[in-house]
Image: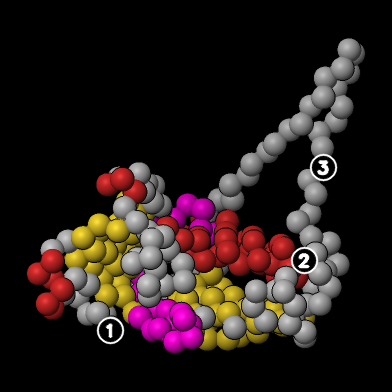
Amino acid sequence: MEEDGTMSRGLRGGIAGLLALTIAVLFCAVEQVAAQPPAKKTPAIDPEHPLAPALDHAYKARVALAEIRDYSATFSKREFIGGELKTASMNLKLREEPFSVYLHYGKPNEGREVIYVAGRNNNQLFVHETGLSRLVGTISLVPNGEQAMAENRYPITMIGLRGMLDRIIEQWEAEGEFAETNVKYYPNAKLGKRECRVIESTHPQPRKQFKFQMTRLFIDKELGVAVRVEQY
């Protein structure tokens, strides 16, 4: 499966001056006289694990996305669904607050439009088809319902650069509990004309705890954001 969130125009929010969002959580146990010192943060995985440096790059990429409120992108995907390879390309417009998505399909289903706004329209998405199907008019679908998921492995609620990166972070944090992982870095890769750093994780032996044998994360070197994921 591949997902591509390559930027089609400049990201808003001042990439060069992005500030990291820091969440400080203090745990204080007050006794009769004195309080205990704040608890130390526990690393997500063992710092010696091969995935630890990869996660550090992924965390930094997540910080780079923190102040990006909306963007336009060309969204391309290739996914195996029911044993069949499904490909699609569409123009994407996304706003983080409230989470809102507009998709205009290229091929296949050229001209199809999909709109989703979290918390609106009973949390359903609207679809406007083309060709003969447009005679039905605009239809509303449950995002994770059977009809909406017929051509997708993931619901529209998970679309976008943040959702894509968060899935990889969650995966690598979970895989950090197991030693059977190899990690390679390709610092001078290219995605189209964009220079990227690629992080590739693989597992020598297939195990039930590993959903994917190979995962590649592409991070744009100039912007510092994750723009593509490949998983096999």
Q: Earlier in the sequence, mark 1 or mark 2?
A: 1
Outermost left residue: 135
The residue segment tinted magenta is: 64-88
Disc 3: which residue: 40
Examine the image and state in which quarter residue 165 appears: bottom right
| Residue drawn at x 77%, y 66% as measured from the top left | 176
Disc 3 is placed on an element classified as loop
218 in magenta: no
Q: Is residue 58 visible?
A: no
Q: Relative to residue 132, is residue 28 drawn left or right?
A: right
Disc 1: which residue: 107
Examine the image and state in which quarter residue 88 appears: bottom left
Q: Relative to residue 22, is residue 164 drawn left or right?
A: left
Q: Relative to residue 164, is residue 151 drawn left or right?
A: left
Disc 1 is placed on an element classified as loop
- Is the magenta region chiefly helix, strand or loop? strand
The x and y percentages for residue 80 are: 48, 82
Disc 2: which residue: 176
The x and y percentages for residue 182 are: 77, 81
| Residue drawn at x 55%, y 50% as measured from the top left | 19
Disc 2 is placed on an element classified as loop
Closer to us: 160 or 23: 160
66 in magenta: yes
Q: Amino acid at mark 1?
A: Lys
In the image, is residue 101 above or below residue 152? Answer: above
